Amino acid sequence: MKRVLVDTGPLVAIMSRADQHHQTCVETLPHLPGPLFSCWPVITEAAWLLRRHAGAVQQLLSSISEGFLELLPIQSAEAGEIGKLMEKYKNIRPQLADAALVYLAERDDFDVIFTLDRRDFSVYQAGRKRAFRIIP
């Protein structure tokens, strides 16, 4: 398997034992090549969702510095391209984190995504009109 982008849902599930998808996401991890790749909009969204879980945000941030998760940079000049993707997919009302991941998939040639959002990521395209391979 190639490199894998990770969306908000699995990060929240991994960091929170109370999440209904915790076990599935934790069991998926050993089958994925490391590190997982993501971006700051995803981390921000995950931190917001984890804010009531003691220590989870700190654990999420530690996972970045420890190499479990690598954040791909998005430059200021790329914001317009992400905005175009949000416009392209406006019928499904994409979140900024989703649009950023779709942009990174196109820019950096990813086609595998670890997400719980099958509905939206089955519509988004990974670039050159390729469908995402969705895990789990």
Image (cartoon, rainbow, N blue to C red):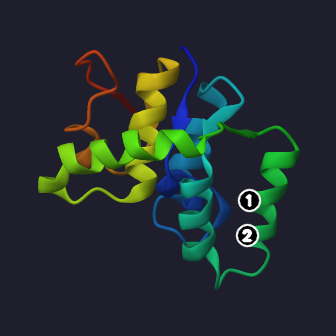
Q: Which sits in the foreground, 84 or 95?
A: 84
Instruction: Please tell me in which quadrant of the rendered image residue 105 appears.
Output: top left
In the displayed structure, 115 sits above or below 3; it is below
Q: Name the amino acid, label 1.
A: Leu
Instruction: Give the numbered dot on residue 57.
Output: 2
Q: Residues within 10 Å of mark 2 (few under 14, many from 20)?
A: many
Residue 42 badge = none
- The answer to the question of whether label 1 and label 2 lie on touching residues, with beta carbons closer than 8 A, is yes
Instruction: Write the residue at 34% across / 49% down.
Output: 83
Q: Relative to residue 84, is residue 45 drawn left or right?
A: right
The three-letter code of the residue at mark 2 reads Val
CA gap, disc 1 and disc 2: 5 Å
What residue appears at the point 19 percent right and 43 percent down from the top-left corner?
A: 88
**Whole-percent x, y for residue 72 in the image:** 65, 36
> Where, by quadrant of the figure, is residue 133 drawn?
top left
Question: Can residue 136 be spotted in the picture?
Answer: no
